[in-house]
Image: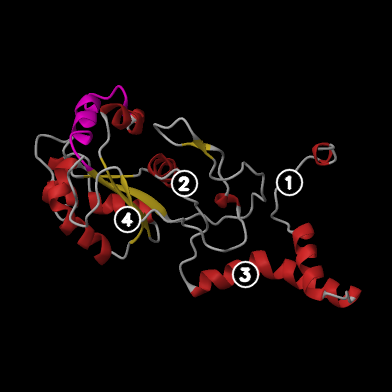
Amino acid sequence: MSEESRDGERPGEMGGEDMYNYQTPPVPDSFWTPTVCPESEHPYIIRGDFRMDPEIKCSPDLTLALIKPDGMKYLDEIESLIREQGFYVVQRRLVHLSPEQASNFYKDHYGEPFYPALVTAVSAGPIKVLVLRAREAVERWKHICGPRIVAEARKMWPESLRALYGTPGEDHKNVCHGSATPEKALEEIRFFFPHMILDPNILDEIQVEDYLRDYVNPTLLEGLTQVCKHKPIDPVLWLAEWLLMNNPYKPKMERLIALTPT
């Protein structure tokens, strides 16, 4: 494609697709089952399917935002609003979906009366794909987008993007898309960014302190206690090996499998 966006990206090219990978201890939501990149013959493994402590809860506040072809003329205004609302853009791409890719992305709407028009509208031109991070990102972005029906958006939430920029009477041209749930957000993010590593999202100092207190300090304190008890020649190396062997959040294997020769 020859079209270029205002920031110089071409459809289908990565726009700063860096690994979103905080150097923090692993938690359950950091691990995902093998994922296959859409429209590719090559599988990209994001994370292993590990069984972790179910009581640990630390999921990233991420959502997927699409600026549809009919909304691209308002891209500057929409991205400005995103920044004003305190969202951090983790990843971005400019792509042009084929009708097959668009129908796959919106497969949950298959059978709905608006499905054919939606697929046609989304594949009509380039779209901007953004991964947004913020507290309660899914609900906040849905609130900014407004109701799917443009007429309802103008009546119920006149300051929403769909009320401001949507096309009345053509609800498939409603400017933007937002993930419906946090689970759906992760699925949609993997659709466009199969290489992306989804790690814990720790936004402020209090959360960091809570995370360290609950998941890091107990094990580290026990390890330091064992160092003092055993007095090894190389305490740093000994502690590192002890932490690897006694990490309570490492993948758990059945004993028979663990003892099987390789």
Q: Is residue 167 left or right of residue 258?
A: left
The residue at which mark 4 appears reads as 140
Which one is closest to the eye, mark 1 or mark 2? Answer: 2
Q: What stretch is highlighted in magenta?
A: 109-126
Counting residues from the start of the chain, the first of labels 3 and 1 encountered is 3
Q: In which quarter of the image is the N terminus?
A: top left
- Residue 27 within the segment the image draws in magenta: no
Mark 1 lies on a secondary structure that is loop
Which one is nearer the viewer's eye here, 224 or 124? 124
The residue at which mark 1 appears reads as 252
Counting residues from the start of the chain, the first of labels 2 and 3 encountered is 2
Q: What residue type is labelled 2?
A: His
Mark 4 lies on a secondary structure that is helix
Residue 65 is labelled as none
What percent of the width, then of the height, locates residue 255? 83, 41
The residue at which mark 2 appears reads as 195
CA separation in Å, label 4 and label 1: 36 Å
Residue at the left extreme of this rendering? 168
Which one is closest to the eye, mark 2 or mark 3? Answer: 2
Counting residues from the start of the chain, the first of labels 4 and 2 encountered is 4
Q: What residue type is labelled 3?
A: Leu
Mark 2 lies on a secondary structure that is loop
Which one is closest to the eye, mark 3 or mark 4? Answer: 3
Q: Residues within 10 Å of mark 3 (few under 14, many from 20)?
A: some
Residue at the top extreme of this rendering? 111
**Disc 4 to disc 2: CB gap under 8 Å:** no
What percent of the width, then of the height, locates residue 164? 12, 51
**Disc 1 to disc 2: CB gap under 8 Å:** no
Mark 3 lies on a secondary structure that is helix
Which one is closest to the eye, mark 4 or mark 1? Answer: 1
What percent of the width, then of the height, locates residue 108? 36, 30
